[in-house]
Each structure stands twice: as structure tokens, then as C-alpha cells.
């Protein structure tokens, strides 16, 4: 049955975010930037020790056990930490809470595509300054009146990291705007903008457990900012959905934060594999950005990316490709295990050389 026009008039319709494929069969899965290694063993211990009878009760709306662990980890006050159901939930609430001006919110033209979805969903005006020819943010494009600023660092899908002086320059030129730095991939890159929180009351830094802490399936994200901004964020959260995080997520998240040694070793392994894969891709003629994330953004000057994407998929090797004018010849390749990256490189050696 086709819905009537009279009904459609008052239904909110947006162009949705398109997530990466989640194939059910056995594949080399390098398309959604998940961590190829399991979470800390402390997570399993925490989960095994849980009293399942407690699942009949609502979880702590303040997420206290996780907020406390994160505050200790980052040496900030507990009133400076907000926890949510993955960084997507945190960022969506940030859009709803902080971007309420008639002036446009600014974010790059090539970036995390969910930003545009949230802006459209919440009826927020926005503009997208173009990255330069090297896919870098042009900071001067953000020296203008705006209703807020958001960008990832490292950016996605370009994997380019900007140093803290770059971030601070944007903050200095936008003292009357909220600036959100989305650090989903920061642990594979360099220094975090959390260092700047004490100096800038307009800065919000968001991070996630989905990448470096191997807990994408648990859905844990968080924001760090000055206490007043966190209070505003909590006010909106409590007005929207008080009990957002499950008991299991809170307990397991806190356990993961406590295992620093495992976390750091995991990062070292992924970075080592990333740098090896970049060198091997270069030998095959691929051109890429200097990735500082857990993925590689690469193209081959003599091989169509869409065709290569399909050929990889036919071999059960999943990567990410966008049909976009500026990046349509690039593939985003998540960093897997050494074995998975070896399978990818072996296939490309055969395919690219044949071409």
C-alpha cells in the first residue's frame, strides 16, 4: 500500500547514514575500522563476574563507574566526563545540545558522513568548507561567523592527523562557538586535544571504545569538556533517555580502561601492521595519505577503485568505497591482523600486476 501524500507532509524524512556492510559469512573484513584483536581479558572477567539478576534493574543513569574510570584515566574531574552509547550517540546529543544558532555549523566536505545526517535530522543549518588538494583541513576557512564547528582528528576517511597547535588555532578564532573534536582514531595518531580542555571552555572532545579498545559491539563513547558543557549535555540526555547505557557496558567499559598495558600493546601491533601495509601498497604503485588512524586511504593511478572494490569483494575481502566525486578513486582499508593484511596484499600483487 502506498502512503498518502497528506500523511507524508508531516513525516520527517532524511537521507540516512549508510553503515559499512556486516557480512555474515567468513570474510577478510577490512571495511568498518573495527579492531582485529579481542578486548582486554579484564573485560571477560568483569562480564563473567556480573550478577545477571541485576539485569532486571535499570542501569545507573549517571554511568558513575565508567565516568569515574575515565576521569581518573584523563586526570579530569568526574563532572567533566559524559558517557553514552557509542560516540555516535554522544555526537548526536552534542548536535542537539550545542548547535542551536541560526548561523551554519561548519564541518569539512570530506569527513564522517553522519555529521550531515544529524544536521538535517535536527534542522541545523550547515556549510562544508572544502579540504585542500591534499585532503587537509584549511583552518582559515573556519575564521568566520558560525553556529559551531566539528571535525574528526584524525579525519575520516582521509586518516590525516593535525597537531594540537592546529586545533588550538581554530579554538582561538572561535571563542564564541562550540568546537567539537571527534577523536575516534586518536589513539593511533598522536596527542589528544583533551590536553586543551583546561584552557578552552568552548572545546568538547569525543572518543570511543569501538576502535582502540576493541569494543564496537558493546557501544561505548564519551565526551570530555568543561563542567558546564557536560551539565548541559546531561540535561538533554535526561530529557531524551535517562537509562542509555546497559549495566554490562558500564562494568566492561570500566574494566577495559583499567588495563593500560593491554591497550598500549594492542595499539603498537596495529600501528606496526599499518606501517608495513602502507609500504607494501606503495611498492604496488598505490598512492595514499599518511594514515594516522587504524585504516589506510589509498588509490591506484592505473586501476579503477570501484572495479577493484568489486573484485576484492568477490574474493571475500571487504573494504570501503564511496561513489563520490572527490574520493571515488580511493579505497578505505581497515588495518586487520598481519594474516588478514597479508591476504589483501597477496591478492593486490596478483591483480594490480595483471592489470
Image: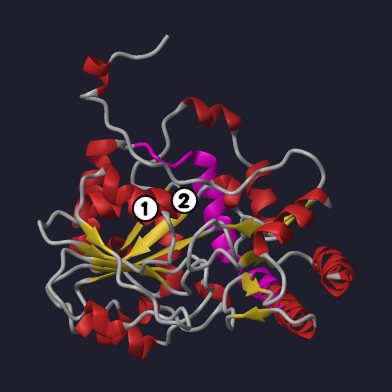
Residue at (54% x, 54% y) in the render: 253
Task: Find out whether the residues at labels 1 and 2 contact each other: C-beta distance under 8 Å.
Answer: yes
Say if 223 sits above or below 18 in the image.
below
Question: 145 or 223: which is nearer to us?
Answer: 145
Q: How many marks?
A: 2
At mark 1, the secondary structure is: helix
Residue nearer the viewer, 280 or 48: 280
Residue hosting label 1: 90
Question: Quarter-wise, where is residue 192 in the image?
Answer: bottom left
Mark 2 residue element: helix
Instruction: Look at the picture and state if 177 lies above or below 126.
Output: below
Closer-to-camera residue (64/194): 194
Q: Circle 2 sits on which residue?
A: 86
- Indicate yes or no whether the magenta region holds residue 250: yes
Locate residue 83 relative to residue 253 in the image: left or right: left
Q: Is residue 91 left or right of residue 335?
A: left
Residue at left 40%, top 53%? Answer: 114
Magenta residues: mostly which secondary structure?
Answer: helix
Q: Is residue 275 visible?
A: yes
Asked whether the viewer can see residue 37, the reply is: no
Q: Residue 290 at what x, y percent from top left?
A: 59, 83
Binning the other alpha carbons within 10 Å of mark 2 as few (below 14), some (14 to 19) or many (20 upward) gives many
Disc on res. 107: none
Q: Residues within 10 Å of mark 1 (few under 14, many from 20)?
A: many
Amino acid at each position: 500500500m502506498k502512503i498518502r501524500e497528506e500523511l507524508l507532509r508531516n513525516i520527517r524524512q532524511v537521507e540516512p547514514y549508510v553503515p559499512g556492510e556486516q557480512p555474515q559469512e567468513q570474510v577478510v573484513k577490512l571495511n568498518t575500522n573495527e579492531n582485529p584483536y579481542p578486548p582486554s581479558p579484564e573485560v571477560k572477567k568483569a562480564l563473567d563476574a556480573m550478577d545477571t539478576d541485576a539485569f532486571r534493574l535499570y542501569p545507573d543513569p549517571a554511568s558513575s563507574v565508567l565516568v569515574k574510570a575515565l576521569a581518573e584515566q584523563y586526570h579530569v574531574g568526574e563532572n567533566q566526563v559524559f558517557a553514552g552509547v557509542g560516540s555516535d550517540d554522544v555526537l548526536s546529543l552534542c548536535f542537539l545540545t550545542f548547535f542551536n544558532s541560526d548561523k551554519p555549523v561548519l564541518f569539512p566536505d570530506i569527513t564522517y558522513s553522519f555529521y550531515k545526517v544529524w544536521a538535517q535530522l535536527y534542522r541545523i543549518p550547515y556549510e562544508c568548507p572544502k579540504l585542500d588538494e591534499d585532503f587537509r583541513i584549511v583552518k582559515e576557512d573556519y575564521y568566520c561567523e558560525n553556529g559551531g564547528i566539528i571535525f574528526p582528528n584524525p579525519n575520516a576517511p582521509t586518516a590525516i592527523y593535525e597537531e594540537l597547535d592546529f586545533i588550538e588555532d581554530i579554538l582561538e578564532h572561535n571563542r564564541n562557538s562550540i568546537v567539537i573534536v571527534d577523536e575516534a582514531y586518536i589513539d593511533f595518531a598522536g596527542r589528544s586535544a583533551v590536553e586543551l580542555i583546561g584552557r578552552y571552555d568552548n572545546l568538547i572532545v569525543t572518543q570511543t571504545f569501538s576502535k582502540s579498545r576493541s569494543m564496537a559491539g558493546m557501544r561505548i563513547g564519551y565526551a570530555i569538556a568543561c563542567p558546564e558543557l557536560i551539565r548541559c549535555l546531561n540535561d538533554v540526555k535526561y530529557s531524551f533517555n535517562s537509562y542509555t547505557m546497559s549495566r554490562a557496558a558500564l562494568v566492561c567499559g570500566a574494566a577495559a580502561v583499567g588495563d593500560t598495558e593491554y591497550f598500549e600493546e594492542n595499539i603498537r601491533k596495529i600501528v606496526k601492521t599499518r606501517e608495513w601495509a602502507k609500504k607494501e601498497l606503495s611498492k604496488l604503485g598505490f598512492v595514499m595519505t599518511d594514515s594516522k588512524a587504524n585504516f589506510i586511504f589509498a588509490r591506484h593511478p592505473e586501476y579503477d577503485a570501484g572495479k577493484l572494490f568489486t573484485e576484492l569483494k568477490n574474493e571475500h575481502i571487504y573494504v570501503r568505497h564511496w561513489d563520490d566525486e572527490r574520493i571515488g578513486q580511493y579505497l578505505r582499508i581497515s588495518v586487520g591482523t598481519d594474516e588478514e593484511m597479508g591476504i589483501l596484499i597477496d591478492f593486490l600483487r596478483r591483480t594490480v600486476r595483471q592489470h
